[in-house]
C-alpha cells in the first residue's frame, strides 16, 4: 500500500479525524501477529475471534492507528478510528484506495475452477503488463480488500478471485473492487443450498456483472446452461468462450493423454497444450485465450503460458509413487466437477481405477439426491473400487454394490486405501475441503514411498 494520511483513510470509511492527528499509514493489517510497523490495524470480529482483544498487541507491534467498533473501551497510545462495522470499514477503505490507483481490476468467479482460472489470467496479463493478483484463494470480504492494498502505482492490472456462499456477497465484493472485467467460469451446484438451486447460483454470480465499471467487459462460458441469463445481465461487452460452436472463442479438444491434453481454437493457428489430467480444464484455457483477446495479447504468448502451468496439491496434481498413480483433487468437490473427474478416470488405461470420494458440502436439500446421482453414474463405469468418506456419501458406495466400501472419516479411508491399493492402480481422491482427504493422499504416498510435495512445480 502507498502511504496515506490517516485523515484521508478514515474519510474513506466515513469518519472525520481532527486535523491535529498528523499520522500516516503505510499498510493495512487484520492480524497483529504479522502486522508491520506503520500499518493500520483493523479489529475484525468473527464467530471464534475478536480483533479488539489484540489492539494493544498491534500498538506494541508498531501499528500507526487502529479501526475499532464504536463501543470499544480499551485504552491504547495510538489513534483510534471508531466505526459501526469494522468489516465494512475494511471494504470501504479498500474502495477508497482502489479509486486512487490506475490499475484495472479483473474479477474471476464461478462454481469451480476459480483459482486455476485466476492464476492463468494473472499469467496472461503479466505477459504484457505489470500485475498483482490474489494470493491463494483469499476471495472473500477480507481477502479481496487485502489484495487491493497490494496495488502500486506501477501496476496496470489487479486480478482478483471472488467467492460467495450467499446472495449479496458478490454485490458487496463488486462494490468494493469496482471491476473492469469479469470472468465467470461456470454455474454449478456448489453453495446451491444457500441460494436456492442452480438458478439462484446464477443470479448470485450475476451480481458481479452488475457491478462492472470502466471498460465493462464480461467474459462468459458459452457452454453454461445459464449463459443467456448471465448475458442479459451484463451491462457492457460480452465475450463468450467454450466448446459451443457459437462461442466467440470456440475450442475443440484434439488429443487427451494421461497427464495433458491439447485443443485448438477457431481462427488461431496451432494447438494449445495444458498439463492437466482432466480435459474439463479446457474451459480455463479458453477463458485465458478470451482475456488475451480483450487485452490484445498475442495468442502465441498465451500458448506458452498455458503449457507452463501445472496443477497444485489438491487441485488435480498427479503423483506417481511406487508404481501407483494418485490424482489429488482433495481440495474441493461438487456434482459437476466430480462427474467430470469420474468420467476422466474411467477413460484411463490403468491396472485398476480406484475412486476415493468424500461428501460434497453445501448442497442443501438436494444433497441426498445429488449424491445418489453419483452412485447411479458409477454403476455403469469401469471403476473397479469405490471408497466413500462421510455421512452423505455413504449412499454412493451402497449403490456401487460389491466394489463399494464406506469409511466414517478420512483416517479410516486412508487405512482402507493404503491397504488395498496395488502396483499399477490409479487412485482419484476427491471431496470437499472439510473432509480433509489430503490425509488419504498422504497415506497412500507414505505407503508407496512417495511425497506429494515433490511433484508440484507451481500452483493452480
Image (cartoon, rainbow, N blue to C red):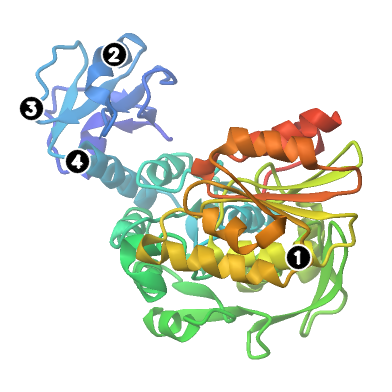
Mark 3 surroundings within 10 Å by alpha-carbon count, few (fewer than 14), some (14 through 19), many (20 or more): few
Name which residue lies at 65% across and 86% down. 244
Crowd tier of the residue under label 1, counting other residues whose Cα lies within 10 Å: few below 14, some 14–19, many 20 or above: some
Report how far apart the C-alphas of labels 4 and 1 lie in the structure. 53 Å
In the rendered image, residue 118, in percent from the top left (x then y), is placed at 58, 55
Q: Is residue 46 above or below residue 143?
A: above
- Image: 441 above or below 365: above
Q: Earlier in the sequence, mark 4 or mark 1?
A: 4
Q: Earlier in the sequence, mark 1 or mark 2?
A: 2
Q: Which residue is mark 4?
A: 11
Closer-to-camera residue (392/101): 392
Residue that label 1 marks = 344
Q: Is residue 290 left or right of residue 28?
A: right
**On the image, numbered disc 2 is attached to which residue?**
59
Q: Position of residue 214 (x, y in %)?
A: 41, 68
* CA distance separating discs 4 and 3: 19 Å
What secondary structure is found at the residue carrying circle 2?
Answer: helix
Choose the circle earlier in sequence order: 1 or 3: 3
Dot 2 surroundings within 10 Å: few (below 14), some, or many (20 or more)?
many
Which of the two discs, 2 and 4, labels the residue nearer the N terminus? 4
Q: Earlier in the sequence, mark 3 or mark 2?
A: 2
Q: Residue furthest front?
A: 402
Q: Which residue is mark 3?
A: 71
Q: CA distance from mark 2 to mark 4?
A: 21 Å
Residue pictured at 42% horizontal, 49% vertical? 101
Helix, strand or loop under label 1: helix
Residue 231 located left or right of residue 326: left
Whether residue 80 is visible: yes
Amino acid at each position: 500500500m502507498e502511504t496515506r494520511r490517516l485523515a484521508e483513510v478514515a474519510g474513506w470509511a466515513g469518519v472525520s479525524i481532527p486535523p491535529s492527528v498528523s499520522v500516516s499509514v503505510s499498510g493495512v493489517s487484520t492480524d497483529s501477529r504479522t502486522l508491520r510497523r506503520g500499518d493500520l490495524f483493523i479489529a475484525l470480529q468473527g464467530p471464534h475471534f475478536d480483533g479488539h482483544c489484540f489492539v494493544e498487541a498491534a500498538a506494541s507491534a508498531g501499528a500507526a492507528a487502529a479501526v475499532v467498533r464504536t463501543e470499544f473501551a480499551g485504552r491504547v497510545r495510538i489513534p483510534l478510528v471508531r466505526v459501526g462495522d469494522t468489516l465494512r470499514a475494511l471494504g470501504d477503505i479498500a474502495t477508497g484506495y482502489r479509486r486512487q490507483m490506475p490499475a484495472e481490476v479483473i474479477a474471476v468467479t464461478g462454481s469451480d475452477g476459480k483459482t486455476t482460472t485466476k492464476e492463468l489470467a494473472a499469467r496472461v496479463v503479466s505477459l504484457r503488463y505489470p500485475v498483482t493478483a490474489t494470493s491463494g484463494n483469499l476471495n472473500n470480504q477480507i481477502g479481496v480488500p487485502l489484495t487491493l492494498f497490494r496495488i502500486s502505482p506501477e501496476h496496470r492490472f489487479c486480478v482478483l478471485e471472488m467467492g460467495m456462499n450467499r446472495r449479496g456477497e458478490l454485490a458487496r465484493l463488486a462494490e468494493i473492487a469496482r471491476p473492469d472485467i469479469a470472468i465467470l467460469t461456470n454455474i454449478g451446484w456448489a453453495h446451491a443450498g444457500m441460494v436456492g438451486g442452480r438458478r439462484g447460483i446464477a443470479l448470485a454470480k450475476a451480481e458481479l456483472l452488475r457491478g462492472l465499471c470502466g471498460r465493462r467487459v464480461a467474459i462468459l462460458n458459452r457452454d453454461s446452461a445459464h449463459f443467456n441469463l448471465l448475458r442479459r445481465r451484463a451491462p457492457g461487452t460480452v465475450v463468450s468462450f467454450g466448446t459451443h460452436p457459437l462461442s466467440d472463442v470456440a475450442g475443440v479438444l484434439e488429443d487427451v493423454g494421461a497427464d495433458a491434453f491439447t485443443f485448438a481454437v477457431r481462427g488461431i493457428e496451432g494447438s494449445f497444450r495444458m498439463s492437466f489430467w482432466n480435459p474439463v480444464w479446457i474451459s480455463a484455457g479458453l477463458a485465458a485465450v478470451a482475456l488475451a483477446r480483450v487485452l490484445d495479447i498475442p495468442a502465441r504468448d498465451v500458448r506458452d503460458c498455458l503449457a507452463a502451468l501445472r496443477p497444485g496439491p489438491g487441485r488435480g496434481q498427479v503423483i506417481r509413487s511406487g508404481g501407483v498413480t494418485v490424482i489429488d483433487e482433495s481440495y474441493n468437490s461438487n456434482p459437476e466437477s466430480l462427474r467430470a473427474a469420474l468420467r476422466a478416470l474411467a477413460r484411463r488405461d490403468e491396472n485398476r481405477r480406484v475412486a476415493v470420494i468424500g461428501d460434497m458440502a453445501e448442497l442443501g436439500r438436494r444433497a441426498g439426491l445429488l449424491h445418489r446421482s453419483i452412485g447411479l453414474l458409477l454403476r455403469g463405469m469401469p471403476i473397479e473400487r469405490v471408497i466413500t468418506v462421510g455421512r452423505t456419501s455413504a449412499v454412493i458406495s451402497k449403490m456401487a454394490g460389491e466394489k463399494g466400501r464406506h469409511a466414517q472419516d478420512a483416517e479410516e479411508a486412508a487405512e482402507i486405501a493404503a491397504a488395498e491399493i496395488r502396483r499399477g492402480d490409479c487412485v482419484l481422491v476427491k471431496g470437499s475441503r472439510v473432509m480433509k482427504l489430503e490425509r488419504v493422499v498422504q497415506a497412500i504416498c507414505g505407503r508407496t514411498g512417495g511425497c506429494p510435495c515433490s511433484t508440484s512445480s507451481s500452483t493452480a
